[in-house]
Image: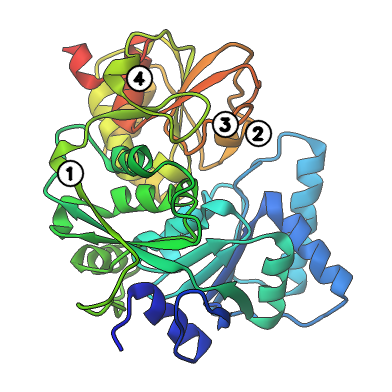
């Protein structure tokens, strides 16, 4: 019987044929948590009273949300997790400075066909590499660490095809927002999205990671890009290995299908206070902005910094502008290529890989009544600080142009 990517991955992991709607127990290849959720995961393990953990291929831990710690409580939590790491001799531990968990998973661990579970909703990011990845709560993640397995309901697969090529300055963020514009935030509940790129080289890995990251904003159980040569080339470039691929059958059946014509996607923003409140940038252009944030697990990758640097080079920003590369590897490459210099000389503040501003944790909190343009993934009330702030989500080109003009803009407005 023909199978989708979802069905192939979960059949392999559960050790039996499965169908959408089945409740299954499945092996987990990678389990992960960060400093903000790790405390609760370890609490559950200690309450169970077990001294045994069965690491799957990797238990991955990264300090990213409140790193370095901005207060005593955050420091205590990280100290607590470090003791756990030492007690269990966890090898895949990334302390302050390595970067954001989801980017680290892409760069160092995830392979096509993996089942990935982490104590964070944006675990869907790993779907960029063709992995079935879900965020789960602390108790579920603790159970995976102890047993190496979890249970889930098999989602119904939905096919999205990306055809053609994007216009200038349009990126993966705009594609994610286009999907949200069409389907809104609740449509994909109980579904897994499988994305086929008809011209693989037209949609690079950074863009795929952004769309996969936003899969949870679409309320999808998982979002996966079907592996292709871009997938293989990316893993080879960052790890020096050539992975195998899991592919859906050509005649696999989907609950429904949709095509995104890339050449028709425009520069888009999500207006306050909902991710699916999607508008053309032209509908909101000219709104005064107090603060621009470029970074996070959504848009802190090398191509995002490249776009920002092209726009900012030789110019000065009129707003507070904070830029956060998603990992040390991204930061280092951006320095070598001169992107960081261009961004800093424009008047931006650049720091190590941390989630801080995205979650309103530290390093850039929005004040009451401030207007923020952010390349992160959520614009909920209070997400980045004050509940009276207004957050607009965008891709890097809009964010950089906005920082230069001090009002919502696109690159063409700078000419």
- Spatial CA distance of label 1 from label 3 is 27 Å
Mark 2 or 4, nearer chain start: 4
Identify the mark at residue 345; answer none if there is no mark: 4
The spot of residue 116 in percent (x, y) is 51, 69
Tell me the residue that label 1 is attached to.
262
Residue labelled with disc 2: 361
Q: Secondary structure at mark 3?
A: loop
Residue at screen point 52% across, 49% down: 100
3 or 2: mark nearer the eye = 3
Q: Height in image: 401 above or below 115? A: above
Whichever of labels 1 and 3 marks the residue nearer the N terminus, that label is 1
Gap in Å between the C-alphas at discs 4 and 1?
A: 34 Å
Quarter of the image for residue 17 reads bottom left
Mark 3 or mark 2, earlier in chain: 2
Q: Which circle, 3 or 4, is nearer the viewer?
A: 3
Among the 4 quarters of the image, the one containing residue 46 = bottom right
Q: Position of residue 67 (x, y in %)?
A: 64, 42
Disc 3 from disc 4: Cα separation: 32 Å
Contact (Cβ within 8 Å) of mark 2 with mark 4 = no
């Amino acid at each position: 019987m023909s199978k989708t990517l979802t069905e192939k991955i979960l059949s392999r992991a559960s050790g039996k044929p499965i169908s959408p709607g089945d409740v299954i127990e499945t092996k987990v290849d990678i389990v992960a948590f960060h400093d903000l959720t790790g405390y609760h995961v370890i609490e559950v393990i200690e309450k169970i009273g077990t001294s045994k953990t069965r690491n799957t291929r990797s238990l991955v831990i990264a300090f990213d949300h409140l790193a370095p710690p901005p207060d005593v409580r955050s420091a205590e939590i990280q100290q607590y997790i470090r003791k756990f790491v030492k007690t269990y001799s966890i090898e895949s531990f990334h302390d302050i400075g390595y970067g954001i968990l989801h980017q680290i998973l892409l760069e160092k661990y995830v392979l096509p066909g993996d089942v990935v579970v982490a104590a964070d909703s944006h675990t869907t990011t790993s779907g960029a590499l063709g992995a079935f990845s879900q965020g789960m709560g602390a108790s579920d993640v603790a159970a995976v660490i102890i047993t190496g397995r979890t249970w889930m309901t098999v989602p119904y697969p939905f096919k999205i095809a990306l055809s053609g090529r994007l216009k200038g300055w349009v990126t993966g963020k705009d594609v994610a927002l286009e999907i949200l514009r069409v389907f809104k935030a609740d449509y994909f509940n109980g579904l897994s999205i499988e994305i086929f790129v008809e011209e693989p080289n037209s949609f690079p890995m950074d863009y795929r990671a952004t769309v996969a990251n936003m899969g949870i904003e679409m309320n999808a159980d998982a979002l996966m890009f079907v592996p292709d040569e871009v997938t293989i080339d990316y893993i080879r470039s960052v790890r020096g290995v050539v992975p195998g691929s899991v592919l859906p059958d050509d005649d696999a059946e989907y609950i429904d299908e949709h095509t995104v014509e890339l050449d028709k996607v425009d520069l888009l923003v999500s207006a306050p206070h909902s991710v699916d409140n999607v508008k053309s940038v032209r509908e909101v252009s000219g709104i005064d902005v107090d603060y621009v944030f470029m970074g996070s697990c959504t848009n802190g990758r090398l191509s995002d910094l490249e776009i920002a640097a092209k726009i900012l080079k030789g110019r000065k920003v009129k707003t507070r502008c904070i830029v956060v590369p998603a990992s040390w590897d991204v930061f280092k490459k951006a320095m070598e290529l001169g992107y960081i210099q261009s961004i800093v000389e424009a008047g931006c503040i650049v720091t190590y890989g941390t989630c801080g501003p995205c979650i309103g944790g530290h390093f850039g909190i929005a004040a009451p009544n401030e207007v923020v343009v952010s390349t992160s993934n959520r614009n909920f009330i209070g997400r980045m600080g004050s509940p009276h702030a207004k957050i607009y989500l965008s891709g890097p080109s809009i964010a950089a142009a906005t920082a230069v003009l001090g009002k919502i803009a696109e690159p063409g407005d700078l000419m």
